[in-house]
Amino acid sequence: MYYICSMDIERNTAQMRKGVLELCILSIVSQQDAYASDIIEKLKEARMIVVEGTLYPLLTRLKNEGLLSYRWEESTQGPPRKYYRITDEGQTVFDRMALSWKELVEAVDTLIAIKN
């Protein structure tokens, strides 16, 4: 019999979260333009813990892929802020990813229900 230690479970959970992080970011930005700190806060509220070192490369990649754009906005509290916005292509990709996610969740839920 194979036993998974708690460290393996934590690692697996972290990998699952990383796998859906792109979908979560697109979801947040599809609702309204967002500053990186806003994105991190919403991810934390949803218990999708992420650090800036993980978020910024992902935002850059999504921008380079044409899924996000950004604008600079002056701030009353410090330097100008970069606000991210979803592009039309990004919205299309998000819609497709969201549908795929729902189908995946349904399939996994079905399989888990079979075991229980």
Image (cartoon, rainbow, N blue to C red):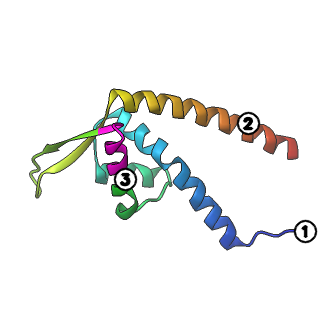
66 up-or-down from 55: above or below: above
Q: Are marks 2 and 3 in contact (CB under 8 Å)?
A: no
Q: Write down the residue under mark 3.
A: 41
Amino acid on which disc 3 is placed: Glu
Can residue 6 be seen in the rendering of this structure? yes
Amino acid on which disc 1 is placed: Met
At 48% from the left edge and 49% from the top edge, which residue is drawn? Answer: 21
Q: Secondary structure at mark 2?
A: helix
**Mark 2 to mark 3 CA distance (whole Å):** 30 Å
Q: Write down the residue under mark 1.
A: 1
Residue 101 location in percent, x, y?
59, 37
57 up-or-down from 105: above or below: below
The chief SS type of the magenta part is: helix
Q: Which numbered tag is attached to residue 107?
A: 2
Q: Residues within 10 Å of mark 1 (few under 14, many from 20)?
A: few
**Mark 3 to mark 1 CA distance (whole Å):** 41 Å
Where does the magenta region start and end? 58-68
Image quarter where the N terminus lies is bottom right
Residue 37 location in percent, x, y?
30, 54
Q: Residues within 10 Å of mark 3 (few under 14, many from 20)?
A: some
Magenta run includes residue 60 = yes
